[in-house]
Every structure is written in C-alpha cells, then in structure tokens.
Amino acid sequence: MAGLFDIRKVVVGPEKLTATIAVSADAPLMTYENLESTSLVYYLAPGIVDQKCLGDAGETFKDCMGATELPHLLEHLTIEIMNESGLAGRIVSGRTRCVNEDERLFEVELSCPDDVLTVGALSSAVFMMEWAYLRRDQPAPDFKGTVAALAHLVESLGGGSASDDAEDHQDAQADPGVTDQL
C-alpha cells in the first residue's frame, strides 16, 4: 500500500479549502475497522474528541470517532492542528461528505483563515494518520513540534502572529472548534 489517502484535488478559496480525497482500496474505510490505529490518532491529539460535530451520533466528535469514515477523522485531526497553532482564529470548522462510495472518494471542506496554515495542517494530518494506520513501526510523529513548526512557518510568511492571535486562541480552547458547518 503506497498511502492511506490519495489527495486528488485541492481548491483553496477565500474562506474554505476543499480537498477531494480517495481512501486507498487496501486501507480500512471506517475507524472501527482498526480501532488500535484510531486510538493512536487520539493519543497524538486527544483534543479532537472535544470538538463539536454536528449531524452525527452526538454533539462532539467523541460520540462518533469509533464509527466514522477515515476522511472524517482526517478532518478533525486537521482542525485540531489548526486550533493548536493559535493562528486559526476563534472557530475552525469543517465538513466531510462521501462523493462516490464505490471509489471511496470524499470531499473534505475546512475553514481557511490562512492558506499555508490550512494546507500545512491537512498535510500534517495525512502524515500522522499514515503513521497510525500504516507505519506504527516507525517513531510517532511529534504533534506539538509539528504544530509549532507550522505556526512558525505561517508567521515567517506574514500569515499571522501567535501574540496577535493569543486572545482568539484562548477563546478557541474554550470552544475547541465547530465542525461539519461549512
């Protein structure tokens, strides 16, 4: 298996990023098909369970994390990376929907307060999930280090400043992201 996901298309607009993603035919499609790997994603970023998740089993992602599609888990992991950067603003949201069930093709929409931040968070989330589902024999990704490096990259490109957004980050911690609302 080459990878967990095949990112086929990314469209970055002024307010959202839309990624068309196929789940590899060799990979599980649902989180319950490999709960050990799903748990590893949780251990990397435990804050994902507290994110709001509308339209699923309950009010938070915790209510559906054990029985959802891998691209939906990818959405929430990406949002957690963005939230933890302190550069995403008050609320980061997303939505995942199946586009073609036979092709295992999904569309993941994400808030896009900064294109480098959103693309970097999505790329980092793919890497982390590929580790959890395909490469557990390798060292675990450094979640906090990845978030810090991404925030530094965004700041160095003039995309924001952690000190300027500190108040928004504190608010985001109190309300750790709304998903499935784009």
Image (cartoon, rainbow, N blue to C red):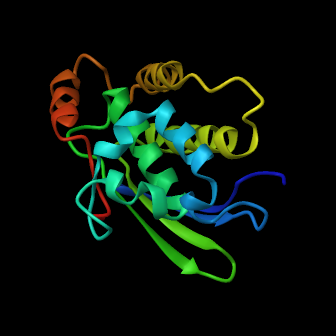
Vertical placement of residue 146 versus 25, above or below: above
Estimate the x, y position of residue 25 in percent, counting from the top left.
76, 68
Estimate the x, y position of residue 141 in percent, counting from the top left.
62, 26
Q: Looking at this rendering, what residue extends furthest in the right direction?
A: 1
85 or 161: nearer the viewer = 85
Name the residue rendered at 26%, 46% in the picture. Answer: 177
17 or 68: nearer the viewer = 68
Report whether residue 50 is seen.
yes
Tally of numbered discs: 0
Q: Quadrant of residue 109?
A: bottom left
Estimate the x, y position of residue 47 in percent, counting from the top left.
35, 36
Q: Please state if 72 lies on the left or on the right of 50 as rendered.
A: right
Q: Please state if 45 lies on the left or on the right of 35 as rendered.
A: left
34 or 124: nearer the viewer = 34
67 or 97: nearer the viewer = 67
Location of the C terminus by quadrant is bottom left
Name the residue rendered at 23%, 29% in the picture. Answer: 169
Report whether residue 10 is seen.
no
Location of the N terminus by quadrant is bottom right
Name the residue rendered at 23%, 26% in the picture. Answer: 165
Vertical placement of residue 92 versus 31, above or below: above
Name the residue rendered at 26%, 63% in the picture. Answer: 58
Estimate the x, y position of residue 105 in percent, counting from the top left.
62, 73
